[in-house]
Image (cartoon, grey):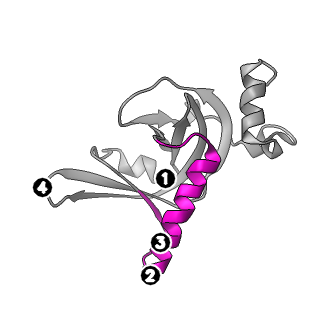
Amino acid sequence: MTLHLVKLCVGADSITDLQGWIDRRLKERKRRKQPLEHIHTTRMTPTRKDEILAGGSLYWVIRGEIVCREKLIDIRPFVDKDGVKRCRLVMDGKVVPVVPKPRVAFQGWRYFEAKDAPPDLARSGKGLAELPETMRRELRELGLL
């Protein structure tokens, strides 16, 4: 069974912000001739690695809602220069908008069951994915979506 992770996206106000940040990091990796993968470093290492890597994604929470995901392609534990155990969550760098789902704030990441994961926005309704992100958020806040 596929298992996902969910995490707060600190510092981004929108999917566009997140994708821009990822694109800049991938461009820098390309310049340095490093593999083109988006890496997010975290303190805790998921113990259910096999379930996550069987098609799992990292779902990002932005402004109190799960709004997008990135496919997880690897989980790499390591020890940093100070001797602290850490983990690199490796993703493909392609942000996929999902049907927004409210989520309260929390620290770190959490396991996220496939049954609880929102569907991709492109599959949820004709034309919905083409609306600007700010308009989708405003329509949801008004109860129209």
Look at the image and tell me whether residue 1 can be seen.
no
Q: Amino acid at mark 2?
A: Lys
Q: Nearer the viewer, residue 62 or 95?
A: 62
Residue 10 at least partly seen: yes
Residues packed near mark 1 inside 10 Å, few (<14), some (14 to 19) or many (20 plus): some
Indicate the position of residue 39 as horizontal and vertical percent values.
42, 59
Identify the residue position indicated by label 3 in the image: 28
SS assignment at label 2 = loop
**Residue bearing the label numbered 1:** 54
The answer to whether 41 appears left or right of 26 in the picture is: left
Query: What's the CA distance linking mark 4 and mark 1?
Result: 30 Å
Q: Secondary structure at mark 1?
A: loop
- Residue 15 highlighted magenta (yes or no): yes
Q: Earlier in the sequence, mark 2 or mark 1?
A: 2
Q: Amino acid at mark 4?
A: Gly
Q: Of the two numbered discs 1 and 3 on the same chain, state the one appearing first in sequence.
A: 3
Amino acid on which disc 1 is placed: Ala
Binning the other alpha carbons within 10 Å of mark 4 as few (below 14), some (14 to 19) or many (20 upward) gives few
Q: Between marks 4 and 2, how big is the CA–CA gap? A: 27 Å
Mark 2 lies on residue: 33
* Residue 134 belongs to magenta span: no
Task: Write the residue at 82% across / 46% down.
Answer: 130
The magenta stretch spans which residues? 11-39
